């Protein structure tokens, strides 16, 4: 194996790791929260819809859901967001959504839009 092939191989491995590691960490966080988290109910405060045209001319839909919850023990309010791509959440303001939080750090969460 010559130097150029070796270098290209390592650059490919490095690029793969740089792309894969954030995804792996997101999946691990979601699994941890689902297994060990506490389910709470938050109130939807916003459902934003944005449409963007791609370079090929196709239209994509982006949705941002915002929900809030106040911890009854501390009185602290937390805001949760979920971003969706081409998946209409069909939610309205003031509806309730299930959120699984890390009880030690409610800023670690997963909004559950459908029961699985």
Image (cartoon, grey):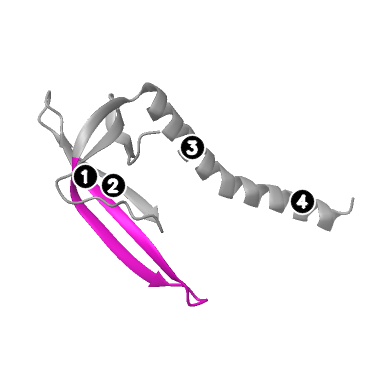
Instruction: Provide the residue designation for mark 4.
Output: 9
Q: Is residue 69 left or right of residue 33?
A: left
Above/below status of 56 relative to 76: below
Indicate which disc residue 27 carries.
3
For the residues labelled 3 and 2, the Cα–Cα distance comes to 17 Å
Q: Residue 86 lies in magenta, yes or no? A: no
Q: Badges 1 and 2: C-beta atoms under 8 Å apart?
A: yes
Q: Badges 3 and 2: C-beta atoms under 8 Å apart?
A: no
Count neighbours of disc 4 (C-alpha within 10 A) and say few if under 14, some if 14 to 19, many if 20 or more.
few
Q: Horizontal and vertical percent for residue 37?
A: 34, 25
Q: Which of marks 3 and 4 is in front?
A: 3
Instruction: Provide the residue designation for mark 2.
Output: 81
Q: Which residue is drawn at 39% across and 55% down?
A: 87
Above/below status of 66 relative to 104: below
Instruction: Provide the residue designation for mark 1.
Output: 67
Which of the marked residues, 1 or 2, is nearer the chain's N terminus? 1
């Amino acid at each position: 194996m010559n130097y150029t092939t070796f270098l290209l191989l390592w650059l490919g491995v490095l690029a793969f790791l740089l792309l894969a590691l954030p995804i792996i960490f997101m999946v691990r966080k979601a699994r941890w929260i689902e297994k060990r988290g506490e389910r709470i109910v938050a109130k939807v405060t916003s459902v934003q819809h944005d449409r963007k045209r791609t370079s090929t001319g196709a239209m994509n839909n982006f949705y941002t859901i915002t929900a809030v919850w106040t911890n009854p023990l501390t009185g602290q309010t937390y805001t949760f967001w979920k971003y969706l791509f081409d998946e209409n959440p069909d939610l309205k303001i003031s509806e309730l959504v299930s959120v699984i939080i890390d009880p030690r750090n409610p800023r670690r969460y997963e909004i559950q839009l459908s029961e699985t």
